[in-house]
């Protein structure tokens, strides 16, 4: 009797284990089936004689960016277009994991849970995906980068449509370089710098330091003045400026991009308050774009001494900025403090509802003040002639020093304060010295294509 009881007990355990396993398999199939089917090693999709044809990827106007011809994946018409769109569209090997071809592979193959990939009757060609971006604008950005590495990302801050997104280094997906693994020039080539890169921001971070001052002295920030005579000892060693600017208020200091003004301001605001403001504005936070985690912008200042805090206030020290984040921060400043969630396909099912967190990055009042200072930068310091006419561009430049062996990262971030052209942008050009010329040149080339 005792033996029979033990046996049935053991059988029950086995039965439960079996049912549990089947249940887990079923759950996994529903949850992860499309991912399994779409792995790079699935020969049905990626091989020369692939039996599944991925659908077309087009830009907003129907320009074909990727398609399938005689079982082979083919990309845009010109080499410039293919290089400009590599990180957005994707590569045939599936290495660029933030690309559309990778993240939307289930839709592109027409995979579904019941028939898997084998339904040749209903889904022979897979589905077409139309992107929000403008292929011509992407090609213009790539050409204006002029061989430099970097990132350029633009979106409509009212609708969320991403209009231009380019990352370099890049390569032609139809002629993958043979030395791609060993050649230093291709280091990090599978990373999309717009989404997965973080760069020393330099002076674009002065917008954050300025916003922290607005929060600390809501009534007195605009009258706060500091003097600049080129270099000054702060916390034991010198902080240097590009000029000798004399006595400045915040408007003038941002226009001239005076290092000493913002180094002193950062110390008077204090490390904890500056870090808190940076966090409100999206630093030290993980932003999401569809299923993709954006590389964090970083501003960890609690342990900084006065000299380090001075450098942090002008975007040096250990501060880092991600281009996608800078773009949505610009969208927030343009849009009264809150940004619209960017999207890459009109079909918002893929992009809406997946974003966590608060999109209010600055207050209404701070947004208005930052906007007016950024407009003054272009009007009085950079020159409206830098951009196509009538766009009312508001912007801030930055030059992030990255060490002795390489020239700085040159940034420009901003937006058009325009009803017809509500476009926000972030551009960083690596290893160069001219923020207004190089980063501004990319923005000008793209706005030339996009502006109506
Ligand atoms: Zn100065």
Image (cartoon, helix red, strand yellow):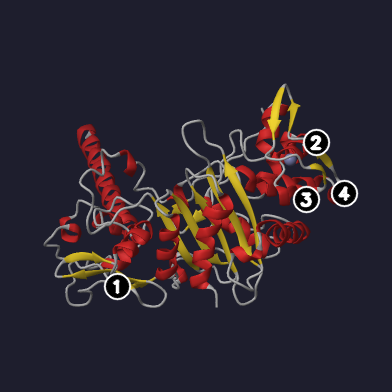
- Nearest to the observer: residue 227 or residue 204: 227
Label 4–label 3 contact, CB within 8 A: no
Which residue lies under the disc numbered 4?
223
- Judged left or right of residue 221, residue 136 is left
Q: Secondary structure at mark 2?
A: helix
Residue 10's spot in the image, x, y percent? 24, 38
Q: CA–CA distance between discs 4 and 1?
A: 58 Å
The CA distance from mark 1 to mark 2 is: 57 Å
Residue at 45 percent of width and 73 percent of height? 346
Q: Nearer the viewer, mark 4 or mark 3?
A: 3
The quarter of the rendering in which ligand 1 is drawn is top right
Circle nearer the N terminus (4, 1): 1
- The residue that mark 1 highlights is 127
Secondary structure type for disc 3: helix
| Labels 4 & 1 near each other (Cβ < 8 A) | no
Q: Is residue 150 above or below residue 240?
A: below
Q: Which residue is pictured at 57% across the width and 50% down the height?
A: 435
Q: Earlier in the sequence, mark 4 or mark 3?
A: 4
Q: Report the mark closest to the observer, 3 or 1.
A: 3
State the CA–CA distance, disc 3 to disc 1: 54 Å
Label 4, label 3: how many angstroms apart (C-alpha)?
A: 11 Å
Q: Residues within 10 Å of mark 1 (few under 14, many from 20)?
A: some
Q: Is mark 3 within 8 Å of ligand 1?
A: no
Count how many numbered circles sit on residues in the image: 4
Q: Secondary structure at mark 1?
A: loop
Mark 1 C-beta closer than 8 Å to ligand 1: no
Residue in view at x 45 percent, y 71 percent: 132
Residue ID for mark 3: 252
């Amino acid at each position: 009797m005792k033996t029979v009881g033990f046996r049935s007990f053991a059988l029950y355990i086995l039965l439960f284990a079996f049912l549990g396993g089947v249940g887990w398999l079923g759950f996994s199939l529903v949850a992860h089936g499309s991912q399994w089917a779409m792995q790079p090693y699935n020969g049905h999709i990626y091989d020369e004689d692939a039996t599944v044809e991925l659908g077309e990827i087009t830009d907003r106007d129907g320009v074909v960016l990727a398609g399938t011809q005689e079982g082979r994946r083919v990309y845009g018409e010109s080499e410039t277009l293919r290089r400009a769109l590599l990180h957005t569209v994707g590569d045939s090997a599936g290495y660029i994991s933030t690309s559309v071809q990778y993240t939307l592979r289930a839709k592109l193959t027409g995979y579904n849970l019941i028939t898997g990939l084998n339904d040749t009757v209903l889904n022979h060609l897979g589905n077409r995906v139309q992107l929000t971006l403008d292929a011509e604008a992407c090609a213009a950005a790539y050409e204006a980068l002029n061989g430099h590495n970097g990132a350029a990302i633009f979106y409509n801050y009212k609708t969320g449509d991403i209009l231009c997104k380019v990352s370099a280094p890049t390569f032609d997906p139809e002629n993958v370089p043979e030395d791609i693994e060993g050649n230093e020039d291709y280091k990090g080539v599978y990373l999309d710098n717009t989404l997965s890169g973080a760069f020393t921001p330099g002076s674009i971070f002065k917008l954050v330091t300025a916003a922290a001052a607005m929060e600390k002295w809501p009534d007195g920030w605009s009258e706060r003045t500091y003097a600049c005579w080129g270099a000054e000892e702060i916390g034991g060693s010198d902080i240097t400026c590009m000029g000798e600017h004399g006595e400045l208020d915040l408007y003038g200091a941002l226009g001239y991009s005076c290092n000493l003004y913002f180094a002193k301001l950062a110390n008077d605001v204090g490390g904890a308050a500056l870090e808190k403001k940076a966090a409100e504005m999206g630093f030290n936070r993980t932003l999401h774009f569809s299923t993709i985690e954006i590389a964090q912008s970083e501003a960890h200042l609690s342990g900084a001494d006065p000299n380090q805090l001075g450098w942090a206030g002008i975007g040096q020290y250990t501060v880092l900025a991600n281009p996608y984040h800078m773009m949505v921060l610009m969208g927030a400043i343009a849009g009264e403090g809150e940004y619209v969630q960017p999207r890459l396909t009109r079909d918002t099912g893929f992009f809406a509802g997946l974003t966590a967190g608060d999109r209010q990055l600055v207050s209404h009042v701070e947004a208005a003040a930052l906007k007016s200072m950024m407009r003054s930068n272009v009007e009085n310091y950079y020159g409206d002639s830098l951009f196509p006419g009538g766009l009312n561009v508001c912007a801030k430049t930055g030059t992030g020093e990255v060490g002795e062996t390489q020239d700085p990262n040159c940034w420009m971030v901003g937006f058009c304060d325009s009803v017809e052209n509500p476009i926000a942008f972030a551009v960083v050009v690596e290893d160069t010295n001219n923020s207004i010329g190089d980063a501004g040149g990319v923005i000008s080339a793209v706005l030339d294509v996009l502006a109506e």
